[in-house]
């Protein structure tokens, strides 16, 4: 069990951790080439294969589910430049009422840290929306803690394995 967890950590969280270390803890500023290298990494290629596996009915493991969820969260943050809470508070209602606009989709998140200034608008390219569709319609349904209430509009899109939604400390 410990070896499986360590393997999961090394293969799926270290690349993200390395990128965030560059962003937050180093004197270096992340350059477009750093993000491009990450998006072209082996990890991202594997995650994209997991989305394909989900569409063909292949077995999806917890490791695959976490990788797809983490990839989508990162990608939504990258494309929108919003606080992590905006993605954390993304609800199925926003997904169901997403509007197609100019080659992508638009969703709004009403509840977030700076909500007094208004709802957050998330712009989602078509390819990411396609992956989000796969995640919600095929992967999320197999989450071990999913129940009937998780199909309601107020349910979070991204579930964790310990709680209903991802912890605030993202």
Image (tube, rainbow, N blue to C red):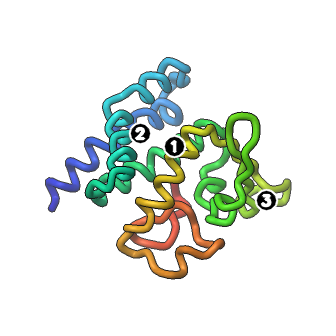
Residue 169: where, in percent of width, then height? Answer: 52, 58
Label drawn at residue 16? 2
Residue 167: where, in percent of width, then height? Answer: 51, 64
Disc 3 secondary structure class: helix
Residue 64: where, in percent of width, then height? Answer: 32, 52
Q: Are marks 3 and 1 in contact (CB under 8 Å)?
A: no
* Residue extending furthest toward the top: 33
Sequence-wise first label, 2 or 1: 2
Taking the spot 39% from the left edge, 68% from the top edge, the residue there is 143
Q: Are marks 2 and 1 in contact (CB under 8 Å)?
A: yes
- Using the rendered view, name the quadrant where residue 48 is placed: top left
Taking the spot 37% from the left edge, 55% from the top edge, the residue there is 66
Horizontal side of residue 93 vs 9, given as left or right: right
Q: How many marks?
A: 3
Front-most of residues 116 and 105: 105
Whether residue 23 is situated above or below residue 83 in the rendered picture: above
Q: Residues within 10 Å of mark 3 (few under 14, many from 20)?
A: few
- Pointer 3 residue: 115
Instruction: Report, in whole angstroms, how far the alpha carbon at label 2 lies from the one at label 1.
Output: 8 Å
Whether residue 43 is situated above or below residue 106 in the rendered picture: above
Q: Residues within 10 Å of mark 2 (few under 14, many from 20)?
A: some
Whether residue 78 is situated above or below residue 59 in the rendered picture: above
- Pointer 1 residue: 74
* Residue extending furthest toward the bottom: 148
Sequence-wise first label, 3 or 2: 2
Taking the spot 59% from the left edge, 42% from the top edge, the residue there is 77
């Amino acid at each position: 069990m410990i070896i499986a967890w360590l393997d999961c950590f090394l293969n799926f969280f270290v690349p993200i951790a390395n990128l965030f270390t560059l962003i937050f803890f180093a004197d270096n500023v992340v350059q477009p080439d750093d993000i491009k290298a990450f998006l072209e990494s082996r990890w991202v290629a594997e995650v994209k294969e997991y989305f394909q596996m989900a569409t063909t009915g292949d077995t999806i493991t917890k490791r695959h589910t976490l990788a797809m969820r983490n990839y989508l969260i990162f990608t939504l943050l990258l494309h929108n430049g919003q606080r992590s809470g905006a993605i954390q508070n993304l609800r199925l209602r926003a997904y169901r009422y997403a509007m197609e606009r100019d080659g992508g989709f638009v969703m709004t998140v009403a509840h977030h840290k700076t909500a007094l200034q208004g709802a957050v608008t998330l712009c989602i390219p078509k390819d990411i929306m396609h992956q989000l569709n796969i995640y919600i319609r095929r992967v999320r349904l197999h989450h071990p803690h999913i129940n009937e209430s998780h199909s309601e509009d107020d349910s979070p899109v991204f579930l964790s394995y310990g709680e209903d939604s991802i912890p605030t400390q993202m």
